[in-house]
Amino acid sequence: FLFIYVTQRTVPKRANEPIQRLKLPSSPPSVNFHRPRATIAGDGSHSPPGPAELSFSPFLNLEGSMPWIMGFICTICRYLDGKLNSRRAKADGEATETSDLFFALHTLQVATNFFSDLNQLGHGGFGPVYKGLIPNGQEIAVKKLSLTSRQGVREFTNEVKLLLKLQHKNLVTLLGCSVEGPEKMLVYEYLPNKSLDYFLFDTKKASSLDWTTRFHIVTGVARGLLYLHEEAPMRILHRDIKASNILLDEKLSPKISDFGLARLFPEEDTHVNTFRISGTHGYMAPEYAMHGYLSVKTDVFSYGILLLEIISGRKNLDPRLGPDNADVLNSAWTLYQGGKMSELVDPSLGNSYNTHEVEMCIQIALLCCQESPDNRPDMNSIHVMLLSNLFALPAPGQPGLLGRKRIWISASVFPRRRGEEIKKKNK
């Protein structure tokens, strides 16, 4: 493999000097850079240093160096084998993660009895939801997305992977997805008590939600939104907080669901202006519904409306109650000004509620629904206000009632433009 001959010298060598091969012990070679020092002659004159010479000491031959060479080669082979195994393990891990992410279409068909109407749990804005049972005995909820979705498989998969990174007790757990066939599907954990609106807006079922349970739901949703806005790996706006998107587990604990409209919101952005308005009328903040101004305070406004619905047991807009009382936000503001906040409380609660907590929640809801986004608290402040009695709440001003008494403009009338969003950053 390796031969190193006698030292190559840059100084002149004797004529006809033979080239010698020297033997080397089994130790590795060392490099010696040597330049002869300048000498002083007897007459005091200086002689310049000689040319540099490069020598290898000791020298190698095939026989003596073979053990060291073989050891070196074995070390390199072990190193390369370790790197290869590491890459294989990483690739296998990624493949396992990806394979665990996807459900076979046939598995979901069998689980839902081929998407039988008897298994349908409801119908959201993006398609029907079915109850299913997979082979390991776990109950699931399968959400079929619209056939008209323009989202590609790659983008859909990336969105699912993003949602899989969100882990919080007040967010519904996404188990995976299916991209086989014409329809894409999301697979969630199954929650037996359906959604909040199933109980809240039914006069008979509403009695199952006493005030303690309702206050537990109020604080749980606040914690979930706080996580999305400030504690998740990336800041996320939900954009569709409403009673039907709050699912209840076996203990009636809330879990925020339906992230179909959710979007990433970079930390450096204060808001974006968008021409594509998405959400549910009645829960939308006025600046978003009418001008496309989107920020974290958009979710805060929706949370305030939800809070009033939980307290009153009525939908946010109900024309059957007449023009003065049709809007729950307008009713709450009128009763707050008149010092009659208790009249907003759901009759199904009777007198079994904490007056201080109810009035505090009404006041917080009005703060969440202030007309200007800058005057609304963030979710961290809301969470602190709900759980602390150590300070007085600020008095709310008139909430954002503009546009709520007329028919909301459909999102379809807003023009779609190329480069539809304009981001506003902190300066």
Image (spheres, grey):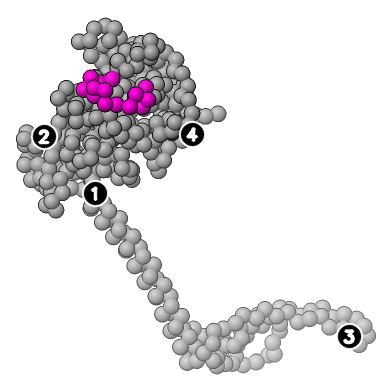
Badge 4, how many Cα within 10 Å: few under 14, some, many 20+? few
The residue under the point 40% across, 43% down is 233
Residue hosting label 1: 101
**Magenta highlight range:** 345-359
Measured in 3D between alpha carbons, the distance from the residue under mark 1 to the one under mark 3, in whole angstroms, is: 85 Å
Measured in 3D between alpha carbons, the distance from the residue under mark 2 to the one under mark 4, in whole angstroms, is: 42 Å
- Quadrant in the picture for residue 248: top left
Residue hosting label 2: 120
Question: Quick one: label 2 or label 4, which is nearer the N terminus?
Answer: 2
Residue hosting label 3: 41
- Quadrant in the picture for residue 53: bottom right
Residue hosting label 4: 268
**Quadrant of the drawing holding the C terminus:** top right
Three-letter amino acid code of the residue under disc 1? Leu
Three-letter amino acid code of the residue under disc 4? Glu
Residue 167 vs residue 200, the one in the foreground? 200
Q: Is residue 412 above or below residue 295?
A: above
Is 356 contained in the magenta span? yes
